[in-house]
Image: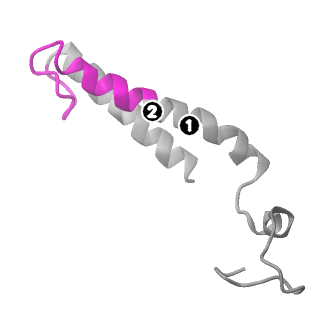
Amino acid sequence: MERGETTPTGKLPTVPDLLPHLLWALEDLRRTPWGMIVVAWTIVVAPAIDPLFPDARGLAFGGNVPNTVAFLLFYVGIVTVVWWWR
């Protein structure tokens, strides 16, 4: 159903009209909140490491331990987003 298109009765579509057109399966609906929580926390915690430790930007793997932890936290967030969109 395209934007602005009406149903056969001439009304705007309601939620029951749109449900068959949604691409999300039940598994996706259960997975979405957890994925959002993981991404939100990794994106908040990883930059918080930078002001606490010198040279801990998390831009590359390696270097000191705080830098590696920040990098891996960003990586977890990105992998979670890619996993959710599969």
* Magenta stretch bounds: 41-63
Q: Would you place residue 24 above or below residue 76 in this image?
A: below
Q: Amino acid at mark 2?
A: Ala
Seen at 24% across and 18% down, the residue is 49
- Which numbered disc flags the more N-terminal residue, 1 or 2? 1
Residue 86 in picture, x, y percent from top left: 57, 53
Q: Quadrant of residue 68?
A: top left
Q: Which residue is mark 2?
A: 40
Q: Secondary structure at mark 1?
A: helix
Q: Residues within 10 Å of mark 1 (few under 14, many from 20)?
A: some
* Residue 35 numbered tag: 1
Give coordinates of residue 60: x percent, y percent.
19, 33
Please identify the quarter of the rendering in which residue 34 is found. top right
Q: Residue at x 71, y 84 (%)?
A: 5
Asked if the stretch drawn in magenta spans residue 58, the answer is: yes
What label does residue 68 carry, if any?
none
Tell me which colouring the rendered structure shows.
Answer: one colour
Between 26 and 48, the one lying in front of the other is: 48
Q: Answer whether residue 36 is magenta in the image.
A: no
